[in-house]
Image (cartoon, rainbow, N blue to C red):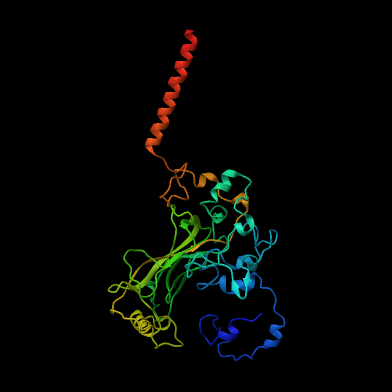
Amino acid sequence: MLKISACFKQKSMAGWPATTETADEEFKVPDYNYISQNVGASGRENCGVCHFHGGGGNNVKHGDLEQELVNTTKKVDVHMAAEGTNMTCIDCHTTKDHNIMGRSYSVSAENTNRIYCSDCHTNTPHNDKVLDYHTRKIACQTCHIPVYAKKNATSMYWDWSVAGRKDENGGKIKEYDADHNYSYLSIKGHFVFDNNVIPEYKWFNGTANHFLPGDKYSELPVKINELGGKYADSTSQIWPVKVHRGKQAFDPVSKEILSVKLFAHKQGEGAFWEDLDWEEAIRQGMEYNEREWSGKYEFIATEATWPINHMVSEKENSLKCTQCHTREGSRLAGLTDFYLPGRDYSKWIDYFGFFIIIISLIGVITHATFRIIR
């Protein structure tokens, strides 16, 4: 297979970083004729080279896409498990004329080119009218992916505001949590990782808005992307999502997100990852992108939302009714724009119910009394 790095790799740059052993090594041009004559259908590992490692490491970004899926079990993903259906990415993400089906709503905004569970399973897969009725307003993923990041942890919080610390010798710092995930990097700040994460839930109709350079925030936290949808929208369903929270650099005067120069080949070129100087990195980043900057910066809370689609559990491990339909600890406690049986109540409905019970008792007693008298 033709690797992206064959076209785009440069010495010591991001994407596929050079190691100490290969930084100065020159590589021969690949035999593209031989490569093109030996291509085949892509497997999970081909796709995973990029998609499993987004954000700086295995499962860091998505939470439901990681190296474990290359050779996994039904407890992790019932579709990709060898003892399951042993599916590969392209079984769902089909391709025509190099256009791959599927959407990532970190960047996508339109309700097009989507893949649905019902494409294979239909909208009535349960042989149970009550359960099938749920599919009108609940995505299959909501019940069938009760947790994500089942094996390796995913990043849940990233605080840029504390980046830039140095050790007593002026060197960059690396710190780890108990599971050996990064908890602090001088070049990136503070991280919080977690696994077996219970999703949050949002209404979603396949559209999304995005906060772009030049946009001005009016409330906090700033939503880097915001999924469209609400209960009253007939096309919306409840979806499980990963909400990644953090702090990012903004201009407190213009209310805009700041462009920061992060990378350079060496120190002294203004890149934050080399010099750990926020002011100079912001100045150069804003200048390069031809944007105005007030000269001030602060760090404010942000959120990014990622729909969860992978790591489907076996049906025995799907959500139970009482995990949502309950007054205490309902998974859908954050969605309050509709009436959910078992979770919500109305005192007037309760009063009416008591009234019906009392009237029924009076009726029974009255009827029994007349029967006895006669």
Q: Nearer the viewer, residue 265 or 296?
A: 296
The percent coordinates of residue 164 (x first, y second) are: 38, 77
Q: Is 46 displayed left or right of 111 in the figure?
A: right
The percent coordinates of residue 152 (x first, y second) are: 56, 64
The percent coordinates of residue 298 (x first, y second) are: 32, 72
Q: Nearer the viewer, residue 150 or 133?
A: 133
Q: Is 299 displayed left or right of 54 in the figure?
A: left
- Residue that appears at 67% across and 64% down: 87
As displayed, is residue 287 above or below residue 222? below
Which residue appears farthest toward the top when viewing the image?
A: 374
Q: Is residue 233 visible?
A: yes
Q: Is 79 displayed left or right of 204 in the figure?
A: right
Q: Quadrant of residue 145?
A: bottom right
As displayed, is residue 22 above or below residue 372? below
The percent coordinates of residue 106 (x first, y second) are: 47, 68
Q: Is residue 21 visible?
A: no
Q: How many marks?
A: 0
As displayed, is residue 197 above or below residue 102? above
- Residue that appears at 43% across and 20% down: 362
